[in-house]
Each structure stands twice: as C-alpha cells, then as structure tokens.
Image: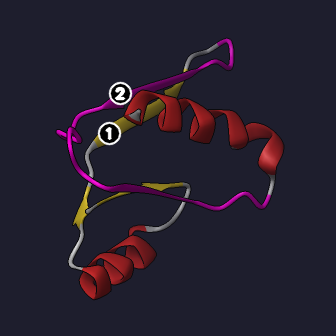
Amino acid sequence: DMLFSLYIGTKLGSKINSQTNGTDAKFTLRDFPDGESYIRIESDVQAKNVTILATLDRPNSKILPVLFMAQALR
C-alpha cells in the first residue's frame, strides 16, 4: 500500500504508514504562476493499492489537485 499525503504534515502520514505497513509515495505537486496545478507521480503505483490523504478545510483551492491526483493514479 502507498500513501499520498497532500496538504497534511508528514507526521500524520508517517503514523498512518507505521500502523498499516504502508510506504510514503513520491510525487511533485506545485502551482504554476497562473494558478493551475502541476502533479507528477514519481512512485511506481502499477498494481498497488494507493490512498490519498488530504485535508479539505478550505476546499476551493484544494479539491482540484486531489481530483487531478486521483485521475493520474488511475
């Protein structure tokens, strides 16, 4: 199992991984100057279970990157 932690401190992701025997996934997430999101999956996710961990406390600016990552992981 692989965990993609978006917008969450690594402490929570590490705690979840230690309890589930998962691994931290490698990815790049950044915003272009015009506000568009860039996501690159760097870990090999083929034939693996993946989980996206994200806080959506202010969802307007966070939901699209989560959806883009979910699409990229498919």
Single out the residue that lies furthest toward the top: 34
Asked if residue 64 is among those painted magenta in the image, a careful observer would answer no
What distance separates the C-alpha of mark 2 from that of mark 1? 6 Å
Task: Judge by depth and name the residue closer to the eye, 52 or 55.
Answer: 52
Residue 71: assigned label: none
Residue 71: image location, x then y, percent: 50, 30
Residue 27: assigned label: 1
Task: State the residue at coordinates (41%, 33%).
Answer: 74
Q: Against 37, is 51 above or below?
A: below
What's drawn in magenta, residue-wise?
Answer: 34-57
Residue 48: image location, x then y, percent: 23, 50
Q: In this view, does 23 lie to the left or right of 55?
A: left
Task: State the residue at coordinates (29%, 81%).
Answer: 20
Please name the amino acid that badge 2 sits on.
Arg
Say which quarter of the image contains residue 3: bottom left
**Other residues around mark 2 within 10 Å, as few (<14) / some (14–19) / many (≥20):** few
Check disc 2 and report the residue beneath it: 40
Contact (Cβ within 8 Å) of mark 2 with mark 1? yes
Disc with the residue nearer the chain's start (2 vs 1): 1
Asked if residue 40 is among those painted magenta in the image, a careful observer would answer yes
Q: Is residue 61 left or right of residue 29?
A: right
**Other residues around mark 1 within 10 Å, as few (<14) / some (14–19) / many (≥20):** some
Say which quarter of the image contains residue 55: bottom right
Task: State the residue at coordinates (35%, 83%).
Answer: 15
